Image: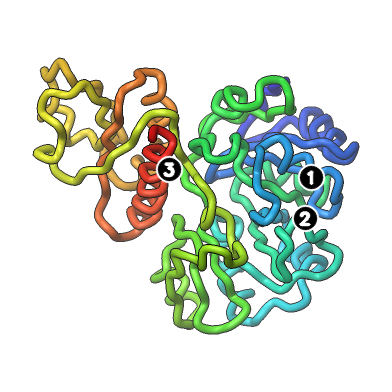
């Protein structure tokens, strides 16, 4: 079932209906500013297991717990370092997830068997209203595992149909999942880049921050998005920076910024999908573009961005999409 809800002033009758579904031990798909999430009450072990079952998600892949107020964090973790608290106050609500030491009140299934838990406060009125009603919600992206993340309710419905209740508040704004940073000790470690960059964290946290992009093959998964296949459409994906890297005579789909549209116009072998005019629009549109490319059934060539700002997170996602999609094709 899909319930259309006002993204700015969500109807409380609809929020209460979705809240009751959560309190009854079931899952609800809901919008955040990043992507749509598939949520269950974070402390309800049986309900959380339904998330893993519906997504086909490996059980050692931890979930992020979403809160609506900073005070809720202290019910979930043993300690919040002072520098971390200051950063949370700056960037919350917003696309930042912090990894802290979990209390036993957070089930092991929610944290993927780890001693830690990732927590964030989403910057979306619908998500915040739902959490205020139901309490902290554990939620990964609302897609089948390995698929491009959903930035619209339609994407969620494509993957789950009527199996879950979906709160439809239109497209998300950021379009990429949150930054995930471990703040338990210094230097802080970014396990998944996002809209909140290393430079932003260093400036406001007054602490050194480093990227950790890979884990050992059989090592624990400290954050979502690190170990398993992610973001992959069902067509092969290749990456490019310059148009001369595109195959000249092959029927392909090109996913790129508007600046390439005029250069590629008139080429009958190319279907062009726009990412807008800059890195921010590219981040917001990339998952929708990857899903759109599936409809054409052609190999997709995706433009890389400059390695700065949100371009770092965008490039990380499309590199994973490219690697995973080609493994599927082989």
Q: Circle 3 is placed at which residue position?
A: 324
Horizontally, residue 75 falls left or right of residue 1, namely right
Q: Position of residue 51 (x, y in %)?
A: 73, 41
Name the quadrant of the N terminus. top right
Q: Circle 1 is placed at which residue position?
A: 49
The crowd level at tag 3 (other Cα within 10 Å; few <14, some 14-19, many 20+) is many
Name the quadrant of the C terminus. top left
Up-down relation of residue 48 to residue 75 (above or below): above
Mark 3 vs mark 1, foreground winner is 3
Q: Quadrant of residue 61?
A: bottom right
Q: Quadrant of residue 155?
A: top right
Image marks 2 and 1: residues in contact by CB distance under 8 Å: yes
| Label 2 to label 1: alpha-carbon separation | 7 Å
| Label 3 to label 2: alpha-carbon separation | 26 Å
Whichever of callouts 2 and 1 sits on the residue coming sooner in the sequence is 1
Identify the element where label 3 is drawn: helix
Identify the element where label 2 is drawn: loop
The crowd level at tag 2 (other Cα within 10 Å; few <14, some 14-19, many 20+) is many
């Amino acid at each position: 079932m899909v319930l259309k809800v006002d993204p700015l002033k969500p109807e409380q009758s609809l929020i209460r209906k979705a809240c009751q579904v959560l309190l009854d031990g079931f899952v609800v798909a809901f919008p955040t500013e990043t992507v749509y999430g598939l949520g269950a009450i974070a402390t309800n072990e049986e309900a959380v297991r339904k998330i893993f079952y519906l997504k086909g998600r490996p059980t050692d892949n931890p979930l992020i717990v979403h809160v609506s107020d900073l005070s809720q964090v202290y019910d979930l973790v043993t300690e919040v370092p002072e520098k971390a608290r200051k950063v949370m106050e700056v960037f919350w609500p917003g696309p930042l997830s912090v990894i802290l030491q979990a209390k036993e009140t957070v089930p092991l299934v929610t944290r993927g068997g780890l001693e830690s838990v990732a927590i964030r406060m989403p910057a979306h009125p619908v998500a915040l209203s739902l959490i205020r009603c139901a309490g902290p919600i554990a939620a990964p992206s609302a897609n089948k595992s390995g698929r491009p993340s959903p930035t619209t309710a339609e994407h969620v419905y494509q993957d789950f149909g009527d199996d879950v209740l979906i709160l439809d508040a239109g497209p998300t704004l950021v379009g990429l999942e949150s930054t995930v940073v471990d703040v338990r000790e210094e230097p802080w470690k970014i396990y998944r880049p996002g809209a909140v960059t290393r430079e932003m964290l260093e400036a406001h946290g007054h602490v050194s921050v480093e990227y950790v992009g890979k884990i050992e093959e059989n090592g624990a998964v400290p954050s979502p998005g690190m170990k398993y296949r992610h973001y992959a459409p069902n067509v092969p994906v290749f990456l490019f920076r310059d148009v001369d890297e595109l195959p000249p005579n092959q029927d392909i789909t090109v996913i790129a910024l508007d600046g390439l549209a005029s250069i590629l116009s008139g080429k009958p072998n190319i279907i062009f999908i726009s990412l807008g005019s800059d890195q921010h629009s590219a981040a917001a549109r990339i998952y929708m573009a990857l899903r759109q490319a599936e409809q054409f059934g052609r190999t997709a060539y995706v433009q890389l961005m400059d390695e700065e700002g949100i371009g770092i997170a965008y490039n990380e996602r499309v590199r994973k999409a490219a690697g995973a999609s080609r493994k599927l094709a082989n």
